[in-house]
Image: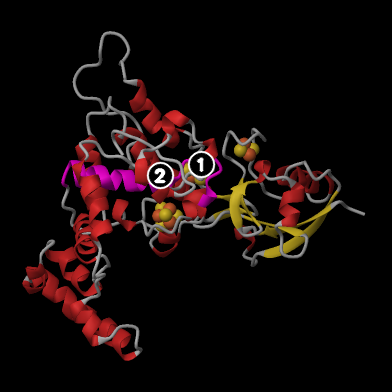
Amino acid sequence: MPDYSLRIRRYSPETGEAPYWQEFGIELDGHRSVLDGILQARDREDGSIGIRCSCRAAICGSCGVRINGRPGLACHMHLNQAAASSRDGTITIEPMGNMPVLKDLITDMDAVHWKKIRRVTPWLLPDGDPPEREYIVPKESMVDVTQSMACIQCGACVSDCLSMEVDPEFIGPAALAKAYRFVGDPRDGQQFERLKDLSEDPHGIYDCTHCFNCIEACPKGVAPMSQIMRLRRIAGADHHIDDANNGHRHEQAFVSLVKQGGLLHEAELLPRSYAGDSWFAKFKPKAAAELVDSLPVITKAVMRGKVSPASALMGHKITDHKNLRRIFDTIEDKDERFELNLYIVQPDDEVPDDKAPAGDAHGAAGSSSPERSPNA
Ligand code: SF4
Ligand code: SF4
Ligand code: FES
């Protein structure tokens, strides 16, 4: 009686046959990895099972697959955990998504992942002549890019990126996290040029939809979406890059509408995103054209009762939003940006005293830990 069952998706494109599922019984202890299970099936039952692996220790990033529908490293998941999270006790293993399949569990990383990594110029571009000896960099600056440096290029985030599913040209989470590694490095002399390029690209930093999938998928805590948000903040707040995708204007309009009324006024957001953060934006040709274009969607929403004509035109407001304004005032008065990294979950009692944030900010973050970064 085997200890575990694996259901592996088999596919060999050159045969012209459709993919199919094949089940294998595995005799291994529960603490052994899913990768060990796949390798046993290959050794004992079918030597043609295609799987890529090397280190078997969650370091090389080559064994990325989907286990029970979620992306991860096959060598980094115990068989007993995988069986417990399966639908019916059988562990389902598929190739990663958003990449062409070469054979069974092996995807073409060159065609998607590595192509996108090359897109962001993944090396330092320092200004001027190199120093006689090594570059001296402040410790805090390197701490700031450490999170993005932890990437092992496994492609798990790419596999589950919703934007990439809709727009395969999107540069994507892994490559943009890599971009932050160089944008945040004080030795690099092309910060503005890199950010301008990534902001202006219609498939660049403003193409991310904040779905959080890459944060959940990453086995190394790189939190690619957080790195993308940092790129946006430096591009917009530090370099004032007014991109052709309306990304920065959209962000500005969003913030100022919430500041004014306590809630988002959607009908105002659209024209301001296209033509600048002002009540008069709707009369500018760029915004007017966009409003006309959106009329069928707005009409449908009104007819289905999702919005009333009054709230569409007048918006909705919180009458007393003094406390909200106080948050804005406190943040805007600060000389240095103070970032709460809301995506690193850590119980409060594990936050070291010297990292504990001041006052209200901690309460607002709940169980998340703060992250302070001069560049973030
Ligand atoms: S948060 Fe953005 S980059 Fe990350 S998976 Fe979602 S759409 Fe992709
Ligand atoms: S960011 Fe994380 S999930 Fe994405 S390639 Fe790097 S290590 Fe893998
Ligand atoms: S085999 Fe290297 S990460 Fe899994």
Q: Is residue 262 magenta?
A: no
- Rendered location of residue 342, percent (x, y): 42, 47
Badge 1: residue crowd in 10 Å (few <14, some 14–19, many ≥20): some
Above or below: residue 294 compared with residue 189 = below
In magenta, the rendered stretch is 216-240
Q: Residue at (65%, 34%) from the top-left corner?
A: 57
Ligand 3 image-quadrant field: top right
Give the residue type at disc 2.
Answer: His
Residue at the outermost top position: 132
Choose top left, top right, bottom left or bottom right for residue 194. Answer: top left
Q: Is residue 231 magenta?
A: yes
Say if residue 48 shows up in the picture: no
Q: Is residue 251 left or right of residue 75?
A: left
Residue at the outermost bottom position: 303
Residue at the outermost right position: 1
Which residue matches tag 2? 362
Q: Residue at (45%, 47%) from the top-left corner?
A: 343
**What secondary structure is the magenta-colored segment mainly?**
helix
Earlier sequence position, callout 1 versus callout 2:
1
Viewer-proximal residue, 256 or 48? 256
